Image: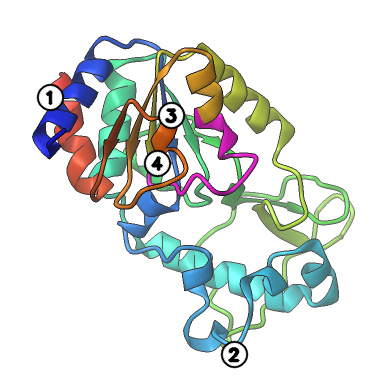
Amino acid sequence: MDHDSAVREAAALLARSRRVVVFTGAGVSAESGIPTFRDALTGLWQRFDAQSLATPEAFRADPALVWGWYEWRRSAVSRARPNPAHIAVATIEARRPGTVVITQDVDDLHERAGSATPVHLHGSLFAPRCFDCGQPAPPPGPADEPPDGRRLEPPRCTACSGPVRPGVVWFGEALPEAALRAAAEAAAACELLLTIGTSGLVYPAAEIPHLAARAGAAVVQLNPMPTPLDPVAAVSLRGPAAQLLPRLVDAAG
């Protein structure tokens, strides 16, 4: 199937679907200039391994180092802007009110593009909580750049005085139960699932498109490269989401 035909076929699927799930991954944020998780370890951070900073054990051992890295990441996210793919996702929601957006990204670009309540499977840089008691911390203000480039003491919990941690899912942690349940229920009930900018490798999140396919939904994939989702996708569009998704949405009407 040639590229234009694939866009038309995907648009036709979207046009006749009312229960839509949009499932996004790091590739969408990367098109806004946000480095993917492992690519973010550059400059002052290049001597670290991602997994050495993204674990409860790392935070327990050196909270200032881990908090400093995540504030550095949040600062980079705050400077980024939603790209046309984020805007197109919000357009799908506006035209099809039953749409559910599920994201593996920990930034707030979907919200800034107009998506109301995306399901964050891997948490959010903008939802910190206490490391000790789990109490949500106040919404953070502008990101603090670590004064020495790396270390920054985390704030303290107002309930128990424990250290506040980033609100993301670390290695070795389970996905948020409510988010995973909401994602699974939406995937099982949808007519169409659009999977955008995700490798299909990170489980259990990668199971969501397969769940939709098993329930009889059509799966449309937008990704520059082949992925493990190719066998279940009714249509696979190769290329940048910021270019392809607006075309698909415009053609669907």
Q: In the rendered image, which residue does mark 4 sit on?
A: 110
Image quadrant where residue 64 sits: bottom right
Q: Nearer the viewer, residue 158 or 107?
A: 107
Q: Secondary structure at mark 4?
A: helix
Separation (CA) of disc 4 from disc 3: 26 Å
What's the residue type where badge 4 is placed? Answer: His
Q: Which dot marks residue 251?
A: 1
Q: In the rendered image, which residue does mark 3 sit on?
A: 232
The question of residue 206 being in magenta is answered with yes
What's the residue type where badge 1 is placed? Answer: Ala
Q: Earlier in the sequence, mark 2 or mark 3?
A: 2
Q: Nearer the viewer, mark 1 or mark 3?
A: 3
67 to the left or right of 201: right
Q: Which dot marks residue 24?
A: none
Image quadrant where residue 91 sits: top left
Q: Nearer the viewer, mark 4 or mark 2?
A: 4
Q: Nearer the viewer, mark 4 or mark 3?
A: 3
Separation (CA) of disc 4 from disc 2: 31 Å
Tag 1 near tag 4, CB within 8 Å: no
Q: Earlier in the sequence, mark 1 or mark 2?
A: 2
Give the overall secondary structure of the magenta segment: loop
Q: Earlier in the sequence, mark 1 or mark 4?
A: 4
Residue 133, x across and y down, in percent: 87, 49
Magenta span of residues = 196-209
Q: Secondary structure at mark 2?
A: loop
Residue appearing at x 44%, y 53% in the figure: 26
Crowd class of label 2 (few under 14; some 14 to 19; many from 20; radius 10 Å) = few
What's the residue type where badge 3 is placed? Answer: Val
Q: Earlier in the sequence, mark 4 or mark 2?
A: 4
